[in-house]
Image (spheres, rainbow, N blue to C red):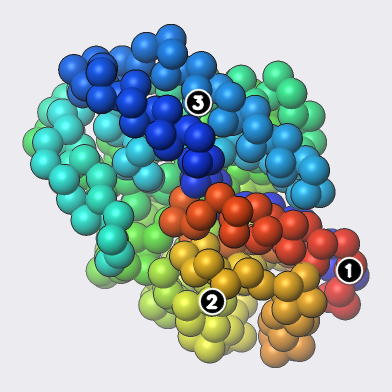
């Protein structure tokens, strides 16, 4: 039997109260925010959002709980945008959608920062280790989102070193979700695909947790998928909302890991999937990948979820948790 684990990809939408309160506070403290500093009032608002988000995940019945990444205004680029050796400049479109982030320009070595670890430490105060899930941008995606004025050909290595150090400072956690949309959106070419896999392998070695590399916004090319399988991770994630046929083809043609992450709930559409619909999608993957046998299937969003209204997001949390209460044949 395959164990179903209900979880999320992190990057939650801010609750409605936080959007207005934080907008007012940030408007008064614009200069501090540009330099990466946050006032006690802003920190308190994010702490409240994180606490409420953890409580909501717990009440929904999720198996893994994240801290929510409420501070990540720049989405996956956040760890760079708050770094001392990164300048934020103009506004850049975030992949192919209507969200934008500040352009992070790397101007010096990406030394240890500890920003992500600090947020996870706060979450770990109330979340048990066997339920705590960390979320990080993948090294290839983070390098892709950056503008480099320092590393040159060593950019991917520099970003990987940075992430390895950051993850190494995390409190004990059960699962690490590594989000790698750029492997789909800006697929690496010959040679670079192998380097991307090696970077992910290095990052996975920084934690004792189960490591899930979650890809989305479509399907990996066959060659990128084949190289990704070489990384020593526990599961690869597939966006079955955007392109279920090609993702299924990759699994059947090249195999996958012993566990899998199933992106079955739409993180960009307000239509709420029922638990029955989610279960049917789990069963569809199982029935149509007859050669695959999974120890664990992480049932989750296909993308980040910050695009959603809070009410719809919470309904989707409930659907994920309810859908994972049954086991499926391996």
Indicate the secondary structure of the residue bearing disc 1.
Answer: loop
Crowding around mark 1 (Cα neighbors within 10 Å: few <14, some 14 to 19, many 20+) is some
Nearer to us of marks 1 and 2 is: 2
Q: Which residue is mark 2?
A: 241
Residue 48 image point, x, y percent: 58, 24
Q: Which residue is mark 1?
A: 327
Residue carrying label 3: 46
Residue drawn at x 42%, y 19% as measured from the top left: 42
Q: Is residue 76 above or below residue 291?
A: above
Residue 254 in view, yes or no:
no
- Image position of 49 (left or right of 317): left
**N-terminal of the two: label 2 or label 3?**
3
Determine the image quadrant of residue 271.
Answer: bottom right
Nearest to the observer: residue 269 or residue 140: 269
Q: Residue at x 18, y 17 (%)?
A: 31
Of 145 and 193, the residue lying toward us:
145
Mark 2: give few (<14), some (14-19) or many (20+) Cα within 10 Å. many
- Nearest the camera: 133 or 259? 133
């Amino acid at each position: 039997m395959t164990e179903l684990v209900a979880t999320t990809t992190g990057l939650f939408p801010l609750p409605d109260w936080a959007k207005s309160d934080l907008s007012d506070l940030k408007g008064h403290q614009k200069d501090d925010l540009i330099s990466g500093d946050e006032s006690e009032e802003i920190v308190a608002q994010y702490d409240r959002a994180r606490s409420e988000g953890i409580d909501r995940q717990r009440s929904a019945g999720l198996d893994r709980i994240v801290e929510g990444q409420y501070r990540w205004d720049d989405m996956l680029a956040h760890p760079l945008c708050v770094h001392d050796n990164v300048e934020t400049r103009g506004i850049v479109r975030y992949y192919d959608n209507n969200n934008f982030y500040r352009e992070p320009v790397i101007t010096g070595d990406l030394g240890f920062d500890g920003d992500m670890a600090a947020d996870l430490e706060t979450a770990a105060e109330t979340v048990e280790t066997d339920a705590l899930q960390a979320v990080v941008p993948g090294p290839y995606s983070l390098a892709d989102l950056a503008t480099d004025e320092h590393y040159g050909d060593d950019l991917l290595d520099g970003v990987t070193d940075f992430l390895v150090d950051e993850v190494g400072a995390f409190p004990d956690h059960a699962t690490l979700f590594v989000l790698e949309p750029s492997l789909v959106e800006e697929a690496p070419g010959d040679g670079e695909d192998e380097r991307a896999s090696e970077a992910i392998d290095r990052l996975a070695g920084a934690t004792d947790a189960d490591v899930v590399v979650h890809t989305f916004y479509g399907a990996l090319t066959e060659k990128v998928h084949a190289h990704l399988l070489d990384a020593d991770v526990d599961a690869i994630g597939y966006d079955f909302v955007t392109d279920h046929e090609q993702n299924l083809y990759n699994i059947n043609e090249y195999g996958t890991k012993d566990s899998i992450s199933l992106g079955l709930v739409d993180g960009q559409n307000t239509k709420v999937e029922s638990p029955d619909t989610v279960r049917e999608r789990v069963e569809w993957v199982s029935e149509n990948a007859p050669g695959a046998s999974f120890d664990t299937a992480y049932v989750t969003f296909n993308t980040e979820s910050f695009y959603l209204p809070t009410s719809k997001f919470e309904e989707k949390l409930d659907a994920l948790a309810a859908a994972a209460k049954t086991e499926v044949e391996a």
